[in-house]
Amino acid sequence: MYRQGDVLLVRVAAIAVPASVTALPQQSRDARGRLVLASGEGSAPVHAVAGPGRLLCGVGGRAEEPGQAWLELTAPALLEHERHAPIELPAGWYRVVRRRGYLPAPLGGSAEF
Amino acid sequence: MTTEQTEQDVWVGIGTRVGVTDRAAAEAGVRAAYRQAGLPEPRALVWCASPLVGTAAALLLTTGAEGLTGPEARWAVPEARRLLAAQDVRADRPAGAVSVKEAVRVRPWRQARERLVARLGREAWSERWTVASGQSWPRLDALAGQIRVAVADGLAGRGAASEGARPAVGLALFDAVPGQQDAVRLAGLADDPGLAGPVAMARSSGWWWPYAEVAVLADLPVVLDRDATGRLHGVDGPALAYGDGFALHAWRGTAVPRSLFERLGALTVEDVRAAPNAEQRRVLLEHFGPGRYLAASEEAQLVHQDGTGVLWRLELPDDEPLVVVEVTDPVPEPDGTRRVRWLRVPPSTRSAREGVAWTFGMPAEAYRPKYET
């Protein structure tokens, strides 16, 4: 399990990766040839991996969807971000989880006049 | 990408339309509604630019507009009086006008529904309602409710001073048919010829007040902004505004007084603390930052502390508590300091690790990062 800021990578044994994952759409690389795991707004720095492998994302094709993004590295690679120290990732499968925020439950009651 | 517009989308579009009112179509709709009800057509049609002034006109026509102390009453009542006078409608004393809403809108709707049920059965009606209005009517109904509250606040004010006036304003609002926001209620029965008048009104106009001899009509709004879920939501200004200046500020569906809305970017701890209710406090907290508020509150309790961070809890009146994990970036900034962040987590959270793990969608015992940067 590796955490870089708001992104958590959970290592998963190849045999435990659900068969449905390999059918998910494969994400293309950015202009610098990297796999972008999570992007900030506008020109904000991104969490990205430069190395051989593939990134598979589910609904909406966004790595942000919880439990829906999977990374397969066929060789060790660096997870990079401008503001965080790089993390060396061994080859293998990872579930990509992006941090979520808590929103309080809707309030009851009704309008009155 | 092409998106197919559903029947419901069409009616929601009508219910949230802004811009120029098709007054000719609306007037034809009113006259048709009276004729269909077996009533003489109204002698005068009085147009107002907003439901606020429309309600003031309805008050002048019925019980009178004396004793209104709300912040908008001092301009809305004279404006309503001027518009009534321009149509030769006397309103210098309580005029006792009689509402014909039951005859022109309520009864025809009930009869149209009975006809549909008789023809196709109860199940078909239920299905028809679901297809035409099912998911959208609560939002548009809530929107009409917010407009009612804003009108009552504007004309009668809030608190003890409004006690006498508020019920009178409530009655004048009860006489109103919410025009475009009536669309989703009419949608499932829009093909029934008996509802042609109200349907034409919903398609072309804002709110309207049918009285014997006189009908008061209000134009469409000029601004009506909603968030992705359909709630009133204005980022840079009012979420709802009418041509005469009547406006409603709202953030994600919660109405916020204009004076406060204009200070959302420069709030103080005191502003948040002084919020009159939980709804407004949530809006203020979202802008101020829950963590920042907690850090500034002496009442905040330290619940738990471990290697992942510090768990804090602050009770909030009439709302769920604010529970936040304070975490510190493992990597220092260029100046050597470490950035502190506040992560809001569910109120049931009992340890800092459980809170941090929740933000990644996992239980505390499963959250064991090998490296963190």
Image (cartoon, rainbow, N blue to C red):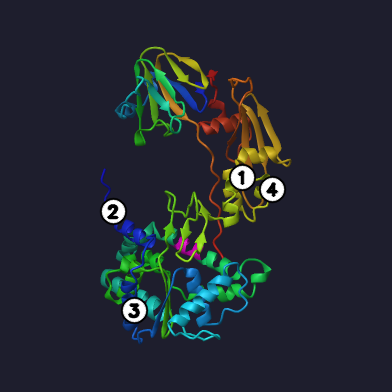
Q: What residue type is labelled 3?
A: Ala
Give the magenta-colored segment's residue range: B141-147
Q: What residue sits 47% from the left and 73% below the top?
A: B54
| Left or right, B317 with reference to A107 | right
- Tell me how far mark 2 sits from mark 1, CA to CA: 41 Å
Residue ranking furthest to the right = B298
Q: Which of marks 1 and 3 is nearer the N terminus?
A: 3
Mark 1 vs 3: CB contact within 8 A = no
Name the front one of labels 3 and 4. 4
Q: What residue sits 31% from the left and 59% below the top?
A: B10
Residue A33 magenta-highlighted? no
Name the front one of labels 4 and 2. 4
Query: How far from the left and from the top, in percent, is residue B137?
Result: 40, 61
Which of the numbered marks, if any, corresponds to residue B19?
A: none
Q: Which of marks 2 and 3 is nearer the N terminus?
A: 2
Establish whether labels 4 and 1 are both on one chain. Answer: yes
In which chain is the residue bearing label 1? B
- Mainly helix, strand or loop, the magenta region? helix
In which chain is the residue bearing label 3? B
Residue for badge 3: B33
Q: What residue type is labelled 1?
A: Ala
Q: Which of B194 and B47 is in front in this view?
A: B47
Establish whether labels 3 and 4 are both on one chain. Answer: yes
Mark 4 vs 2: CB contact within 8 A = no
Residue for badge 2: B5
Q: Which of B311 and B326 is in front in this view?
A: B326
- Tell me how far mark 4 sits from mark 1, CA to CA: 12 Å
- Tell me how far mark 2 sits from mark 3, CA to CA: 29 Å
At mark 2, the secondary structure is: loop
